[in-house]
Amino acid sequence: MGVVRYLFIALILLLFVACGESKPSISSVTQPPAETSKAAPASGVRVALIMKTLTNPFFIEMEKGARRAQQETGIDLKVMTATQETSIEQQIQLVENQIEAGVQAIVIAPGDSERLVPVLKKAQDAGIRVVNIDNRLDAKAVLANGMKPIPFISVDNEQAAYLSAKFAADKLTQPTEAVILEGIRSADNANQRKLGAERAFRENSRVRVVAMETANWKIDEAYLMAKQVFAAHPNIGLVFCANDMMAIGVVKYLQETGRRKVRVAGFDALDEAKVAVFEGRMTGTVDQQAAQQGYQGVMTVLKVLRGEAVPQEVLVESRLITAGDLK
Amino acid sequence: MKFFKIGFAFKLTAFLLAIGVLPQLIFQLVSYSATRQAILDDAKQHNMVVVANQRDYLSLQMEQINSLATNLASVDEINQVLIAPGETGQSAYDLLATKARIGYVLSGYSNLRGLVSIDLFTLNGMQYHVGDTLNLAHVRTDLRDRLMQSSFSAGNRLVWHGVEDNVNASSGSGKVVVATRAVSRVNSSSAALAGLLLINFSTDYLHRYFSKIDLGAGAYLMVIDAQKRLIFHPNKKLIGQTIKTELSHLLQGESGAISLQLDGRDVLLSYSQMPDKNWYVVSVVPGDTLLAPMNRIDRIGVALLVFNLLLIALFIRAYLRHIVWPIRAISAGFRRFQAHQVEDGWRMTKQGAVGEIRELVDWFNSFLESTEANRQAQVSLRIAATAFESQEGMLVTDADSVILRVNQAFTTITGYTAEDAVGQKMKLLKSGRHETSFYASMWEMIGRTGTWQGEIWNRRKNGEIYPEWLTISSVKGSDGVITHYVGTMTDITARKAAEAEIKHLAFYDALTQLPNRRLLQDRLIHAMAGSKRSGRYGALMFLDLDNFKPLNDNYGHGAGDLLLVEVARRILSCVRETDTVARFGGDEFVVLLGELDTEKAPSVALAGAIADKIRQALARTYKLDIPHADEVEHHCTASIGVVVFFDHECGVEDALKWADMAMYRAKEAGRNLIRFYE
């Protein structure tokens, strides 16, 4: 009996011993990482901010505002822009990419008020919340595509443009030919600014608008357009540009051709434009608080995500900046 | 017992385990270890393939970036930027327009997936950028300068720096894979390096890609750069961290696989080096995951083992129930039997027992039965032995009447001791009083009915013949053949004597020893019968003492009794032997005379003569010797009545009445007289 028992125990022991062998042992892959992040704890919410162009410093401000909202809320914010203001297809593609990436919300400054609508409808259908900033989407297109209402954050473009144009025109003492340089014509804010400028010029009996052209918001196109317009109308004394980039392009042309008397009104309050205003090359520009728009856009979409009621339209205050403000 | 209680079942269990489970265990063990090795080898190979695939993927990504950088470096606009003078003196328009132009160029190259940003840093301090932020206000200049320095020293080729912080601190991508390329002015006399093309690749993108690769439960990939920092790890927080030196020391050579303990788990670590770089793609697969296919084998093995053990347990249970316990019960039964604790009539149940064990129980029970029967027989024998030594004489013989045994009472009755009697035949006791036919009929009856009883005369050792009451019974064996005879005898000598005494008392007067009235009547009937036979007359005399009462009154009954005895003696002396003298009661006597004469007259004369003889004899003076008194003389006569009878002329009562009447006439006539009934 004893022999059987000892055999049995020995065999069981053998079973266990046979399995063990010595191996190198490492407690973890890295030293435990030191937690240094001072940002709000990650909320896991993914938001995309899609802007128009990487060349306009205006959008840098807008991004800054959005980043501030990110810092405060701990969301995962992706910022992306189309290459140029005219890269509408690229912007559509960016929206597509974000739908695919599965973000919960998109804050968009659409380059075009109509062409972006279908892809944003697709985003809404995918459950993505959309907030519109800067340039308003076309209400009819939104309705026609069956989209749910989209909160909009911007400035009163028409009024701001009116003030900028009016300020430039008010100082005129004799009849003056004027030109309006528009943004992308299918963009609502471009249209609003044009309307604002038209209103201001209409009200002033000395001003006669001889040309209305578009330079698609772009600095170099504006330079070329100025060359073209001034060739046709050499006596132009007043230029309203729907943004500062175009204004800087025009100013470049005026400097090169020595036309020191032409008054140029801008929009956006870029640092470069403010310098021009200060130096007297431009009459004024409009600060439309790009950072505030970016910040509000993100915060609004977060409210929507939380299911809170938000106003359908928030108008950020805009301010006319003239040489007097900068001294 | 102990052997039974523990040892036997245990031994059997061990034996069954040894023949049933042990070979299975060994087989399982061997097949397990073989399968395990095969699976591990397979897993190692598989992991090496996975790791190599991911390494190739990464190489492809890097190659794309390499060609992107090469293309960018040769773009005219970029060359122009490098030639352009420094920032000072440039108009806002130039600055913005250039930035826009270069931005368009860079943007054209930025649609490679996973690309975070492309930056062009010129030596004159300009930064052209396309990427996930527009804000270039926060540039990590130390990092930029370090990257620039290391890239410039490498010349016009792409340098991979591994995982670094993003040069643009505003970017949402904190940790990026950085590649740089120094660019030089093309149309310049001196091909001096004038700018740095910096490409940030997203670790998030890599994370998304690598996270999708499923290596099995708990398994994961890692990508490690030349500075042993993590480019990819499933835990995003670890990206950019330096791995432990113990771990980095393990990564040697182009590829390999190592088993180790990591995070307290056994894992297989497989790695492959990126070509031309000291980067590694590493997979970490827990041993459990590798051996997951073994689980099924394990489960089946364990199930088999359990089934086997269950079978053995069931068998052992049945074995215990049907064999061991019954045997134990039998052994306990014997123990109780030995300790005399088995009650009569108790029998072991056959519950559970099977086959031979059942038989064993049967035999045990029949053993108990026979033991009980034996004990009862012994009791019976003891009772028989006690009964044998009773007051009755007893003897036992064999079938040939040879005495085997006698008891004490036998010796007392016959005088023969056991030594005398045993071995002798029964005829030892024969008295010779009985005819041979008596014995023949006796034995005939025993042979027929099995028993005989009756009175028999036997002879004692001292020769005395005595009567006894004898019962003889035959004892038959189970085959019906007579084996023994048992005789029971009672000495009835005393009884016989008592019977005679009683008989005497019934027919004789105790005082005078004369027949009493009953015997007289009997004799009278006989006499009358004899008279008829012989044709001779008989006579009946009735005597009454004339002066008896005063004696009794004066001297007591003792004196009376003495007188009566003397009267009886005197009357007897006067009659013949064949005549009867009876005391009829009190002082009355009757004398019966038979065989007188064939004629009446001579008969009367003869009777008268005898009567007178009696009258005279009784009339003599009596001298009575009364104890404790003086001798008394008494004078007493008798009055006698006589009747002569023949045949049955009259009845017995008539004769007595007539004699009595004659006696009274004699009394009336003056006493001491004789009168005949006429």
Image (cartoon, coloured by chain):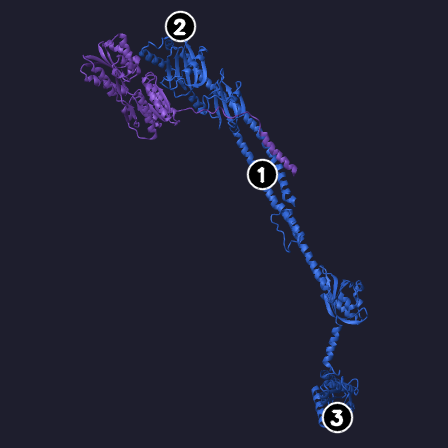
* Disc 2 residue type (three-letter): Ser
Mark 1 and mark 2 on one chain: yes
Residue drawn at the location 24% of the way across and 11% of the way down: A262
Q: CA distance from mark 3 to mark 2?
A: 222 Å
Q: Colour of chain B?
A: blue
Nearest to the eye among marks 3 and 2: give it: 2
Quick one: SS at disc 1?
helix
Which residue in the structure is indicated by mark 1?
B309
Identify the subunit bearing mark 1: B
Label 3: element kind: loop
Mark 3 is on which residue type? Asn
On residue B188, the disc is: 2
Q: Chain of mark 3?
A: B
Q: CA distance from mark 1 to mark 2?
A: 90 Å
Which tag, 1 or 2, sits closer to the chain's start? 2
Q: Position of residue B14 (x, y in %)?
A: 62, 39
Q: Nearer the viewer, mark 1 or mark 2?
A: 2
Q: How many marks?
A: 3
Q: Which mark is residue A309?
A: none
Q: Furthest-top residue in view?
A: B189
Q: Position of residue A26 (x, y in %)?
A: 52, 25
**Quadrant location of residue B324?**
top right
- Disc 1 marks a residue whose amino acid type is Leu
The chain letter for the residue carrying disc 2 is B
In this rendering, the answer to whether B603 lies above or below A85 is below
Q: Which mark is residue B672?
A: 3
The answer to whether B52 is drawn above or below residue B483 in the figure is: above
**Which is more toward the observer, A159 or B271?**
A159
Q: Residues within 10 Å of mark 1 (few under 14, many from 20)?
A: some
Residue nearest the viewer, comparing B209 with B562: B562
- Asked which secondary structure carries label 2, the reply is loop
The residues bearing labels 1 and 3 have C-alpha atoms spaced at a distance of 134 Å
